[in-house]
Image (spheres, grey):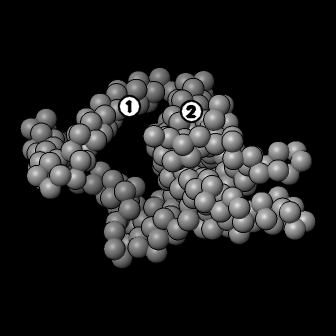
Amino acid sequence: MNLVNLSALDLGLASALILALAAMSLWLSLGLERTLLINALRMTVQLLLVGLVLKVLFAHASLLWIALGAGFMLLVAGREVMARQQRRFSGAWGYGLGTLALTVPSLAIILLALVVLVRPVPWYEPQYAIPMFGMLLGNSMSGVAVGLDRLMQAAWQQRNVIEGQLLLGQTWDQAISELRHEAARAGMIPIINSMAAAGVVSLPGMMTGQILAGSPPTEAVKYQILIMFLIAANTGFATLGGVWLGSKRLFDERERLRLDRLRKVT
């Protein structure tokens, strides 16, 4: 099977759908047209740039450049986690919390995938390393952002309940455990739903891309199963870690609730 190349005209016609949606938003006074158009333009520019970067990486693959690319992706993912929280920690913690929560499981799981499971030669082959790492981060980023946002919002709304439990002698861990569990659950639900719907409601992106590129469907399915397992595990560990770190940060060394460390994003 030959890959059908898309022209600029094809992409322009597809973008007309976004313009139509923006016009509908304007007509219905939803107020989303500006955001929709800006993000569509941002996505286009970002993907075109990453296409050029990947072309260079594929042509001149080295561990140093792959590591730098992965580090940059982690930093951007950490920023996106912070940007989607209505209430977040002020200062460096606002950025560092999500970045740390993503870094540890993501690096461990991508190394496991490349060195033990897929085993490309060399093991850091960018054709495998960069797309797989991007899929891990993209899905985990959403889970961590949802989990932290739910935790911070719930802690703010139920601050009197938490302080009352502390006065009754509970530790900080006990006082916020229920909110932490609900936040972690909220962060993990999307990837659980994705696994439940895969192959029945939707054909996941990696599988679809491989089929369009001409890979045998059975081989595409095996890769999709692998990446879904990796994404689910990474999302779960990152969300649990981020929510735990966030809940601990809400209290000081004397186990007092410190909501003054949060600031609301307008």
Q: Which SS class for mark 2?
A: helix
Q: How many marks?
A: 2
Who's the residue at 65% across and 57% down the image? 155
- The residue indicated by pointer 2 is 75
Report the amino acid beneath label 1: Val
Q: Which SS class for mark 1?
A: helix
In this rendered view, identify the residue nearer to me: 138 or 211.
138
In this rendered view, identify the residue nearer to me: 228 or 243.
243
Q: Residue 263 at x, y = what percent?
A: 59, 40
In this rendered view, identify the residue nearer to me: 222 or 139.
139
- The residue indicated by pointer 1 is 50
Q: Residue 6 at x, y = what percent?
A: 16, 42
Q: Is residue 20 visible?
A: yes
Foreground tag (1 vs 2): 2
Earlier in the chain: of badge 1 and badge 2, it is: 1
Q: Is residue 147 above or below residue 33?
A: below
Who's the residue at 77% across and 51% down the image? 257
